Image: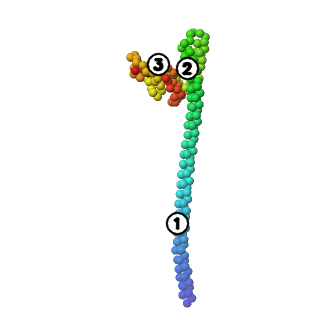
Amino acid sequence: MEENQNEIKEETVSAEKNEEKPKDKKESKKEVKKLTEENEKLNESLSELTDRYTRMLAEYDNFRKRAQKEREGVYFDAVSDVLNAILPIKDSLEMALKFADDSQLSQGVTLTLSKFGEILNKLGVEEFGVAGEEFDPNLHNGVLHCEDDTLGEQIIAEVLQKGYKKGDKIIRYAMVKVAN
């Protein structure tokens, strides 16, 4: 009888162990599923934060570029305003030189104009609008028209006021007389 009881006890113990294994497997599967869901949530959160970081970095870069362009624009506007205020003085000196004789006064005006040209070169300002060039409406303001068989069509016959530009930007358009 004792043997039977020992066998029954062993069977009961082994049955309990067998029951615990499936129970542990179910709990393990639940725990794995729970950890997998948590991992997915963390990955989604990481992806969202990475996306926000990337967008913020791009936004900052765009802001930096926009601010740089604005600074350049303000600088060009300031230079343009100053030059537009000063260029009529240069025009007047050039006009005075056309009507001057060979006196010391005309030499002084010539020196002043040469200094003016040096300063404009240092600032990166270029003159344009020369008689004989082809008329370009992007650079020239055609205010007069004449018929001249010696000049071709759309050729500048006379420059009434020189034009100035800094880089690609026009400070003042050249006022010209266009032939044909």
10 Å crowding of disc 3: few (<14), some (14-19), many (20+): some
The residue carrying mark 1 is 33
Q: Nearer the viewer, mark 3 or mark 1?
A: 3
Task: Name which residue type carries label 3.
Answer: Glu
The residue carrying mark 2 is 91
Task: Name which residue type carries label 1.
Answer: Lys
Residue 24 vs residue 120, the one in the foreground: 120
Compute the Cα span from label 1 to label 2. 85 Å
Can you give x and y, in whole percent of width and height, for residue 136 in the image? 45, 26
Please, which residue is most extreme toward the top here? 102
Q: Residue at x 53, y 60 (%)?
A: 40
The residue carrying mark 3 is 158
Determine the secondary structure under disc 3: strand
Q: Is residue 122 visible?
A: no
Residue 101 vs residue 53, the one in the foreground: 101
Quadrant location, the C terminus: top left
Compute the Cα span from label 2 to label 3. 15 Å
Q: Earlier in the sequence, mark 1 or mark 2?
A: 1
